[in-house]
Amino acid sequence: MNRGRPTVTSSLDLYSSVTERYNVLLDLARTLTSTLVPSALYEALHQHVVRVLPMNAFTVAVVNRAGEARTVFQAGEGNGAPLLGAVEMEHLRAGDFVLRGAPGDATALLAAPMTCEGRLIGYLAAQRRDARPFDATDANFLLAVGQLAAVAVENARLFAEVRRRGEEAERLEAIARDLSGSLELSEVVERAANRAFDVVSKPVVVWLLEGARIRAVARAGGAMIRLGEERLLPPASIARLKAEALSQPSIPANSAPHAEIPMGADGLAAGARDHGRILVPLTLGPRLIGLFAVGPWSDEPPDPDRIALLHRMAPHASAAIENARLHDEVRRLSLTDPLVQLPNRRQLDLFLEKEFAAAERGRPLCFVLYDLDRFKEYNDTHGHRAGDVALIRFASVLRAETRAMNLAARYGGEEFATVLSGTDLAGGRAHAERVRERCAETFGGEMTVSAGVAEYVREMRTPIDLVVAADRALYRAKVGGRNRVCVAEL
């Protein structure tokens, strides 16, 4: 019967749980090396760990650069294992595990760190509710899992970052194409506001710098600001925004809701991000041309990655805005008389053609032609420079007496014209009389003007017919004694 003879037991029988855990670690290593999608990676972690570590809840948390933990996966009862306290997080940063619970306690918790190059990037946590605490063997197993998981999580993060960067590059390319697809400044700034809103999903206002002031030129996402509204931007704030453009962090600006661009001692009052704004500078080299104002928000602040993307979008918006400005300036110069700074004959013809078409649809239209009386004699007497000054002074009179919706232009030489949209013959004559009287006052009677007024009638076929009618009326004013207004005869 072999009494007293010791029973031989296999070491594998004694440590069957260790063997199984070793197999789980091998399986997990193979699985994690082939998994680059975070959600699938976290699920694989849970499925392998639960094979040898009975639990009621499992949590994977990641830690951001600020040291804040965020749950990215949870399984089992409730909301997974509870988040850890500050002291417990310090244990994890030191590479140690965390154990809660003793025999007889209702719950037990085990957490192990995931570290990469000495930095805590997250942790794994398991919870039991069967009054059986975790032991050192469990802790060592989860520590080993955490080491494997850390490499896989970091690889997945890098892969996701590369993919995100690629997607962002494609998105920025599409945004750049959209912004450069127009040379109309109003359209470019509107596109910039809409694309910025698409990026950050918060209200956006585009402000452009004009001297020491900024003006709201476009908005998106329900931003409560009146377009055209202006704010003072002191030199200190301009310098600050330029510096921010180089380093590219966002500038939090606290304000009451709907009070755009709060101004403090330095022009930008720093404060809490809640209900605030983030300002993203628009620069070209060292020159600040404007800014995106993001906010206000009443819910969660904008995602930092989205703000970073808006910073990367800003140079494309700046270039598109500046190109549109240059185009606008070139066009303005090509359509503006360089001496008197009124629209020239080319712009007059374009505007008149558009308003003539509106008149054919039923809107009243008047055309007034002016001629400075005896201008050649004035030029010969006082010199060409004095003649130029006279033309400039009369242009100022004409500009002051012409509403913004209408057009005052230099027709050629000493002749000028106004196109009066929505104005009948009586209104056109009254306008011309005001100009005539103001001219006489401005020059003290030394220079006068004659005017011919014509109203659109259905018999007219082209804008030239309207101009000819006004020219004939002007001719009658000249031969009738000058310094007078005549209307076209039907």
Image (spheres, rainbow, N blue to C red):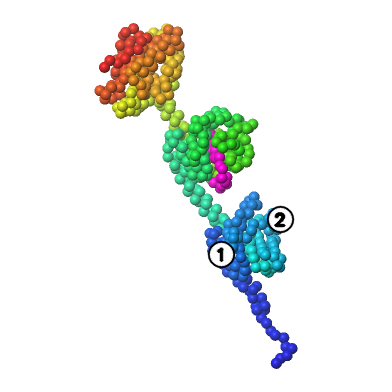
Q: Quadrant of residue 49?
A: bottom right
Relative depth, front residue between 454 and 408: 454
Q: Is residue 13 visible?
A: yes
Mark 1 or 2, which is nearer the eye?
2
In the image, which disc is placed on residue 130? Answer: none
Q: At x 66% / y 57%, what residue is drawn?
A: 84
Q: Is residue 251 magenta?
A: no
Identified by mark 2, the residue type is Val
Number of labels in the image equals: 2
Q: Is residue 194 above or below residue 346?
A: below
In the image, which disc is placed on residue 87? Answer: 2
Q: Residue furthest right?
A: 4
Identified by mark 1, the residue type is Ala
Q: Is residue 293 magenta?
A: yes
Q: Is residue 388 visible?
A: no
Label located before the other in sequence (1 or 2): 1
Q: Is residue 396 left or right of residue 21?
A: left
Q: At x 59% / y 59%, what residue is drawn?
A: 79
- In three-dimensional space, the C-alpha distance between marks 1 and 2, rounded to whole angstroms, equals 29 Å
Q: Is residue 161 above or below residue 455?
A: below
Label 1 close to label 2 by CB (< 8 Å)? no
Callout 1: 10 Å neighbours few (<14), some, many (20+)? Answer: some
Q: What percent of the width, then of the height, locates residue 51?
A: 59, 70
Q: Residue furthest left?
A: 459
What are the residue bounds of the magenta stretch? 289-306
Q: At x 47% / y 41%, what residue is drawn?
A: 194
Q: What percent of the width, then of the height, locates residue 71?
A: 60, 56
Relative depth, front residue between 31 and 366: 366
Callout 2: 10 Å neighbours few (<14), some, many (20+)? Answer: few
Q: Quadrant of residue 418?
A: top left
Q: Quadrant of residue 311?
A: top right
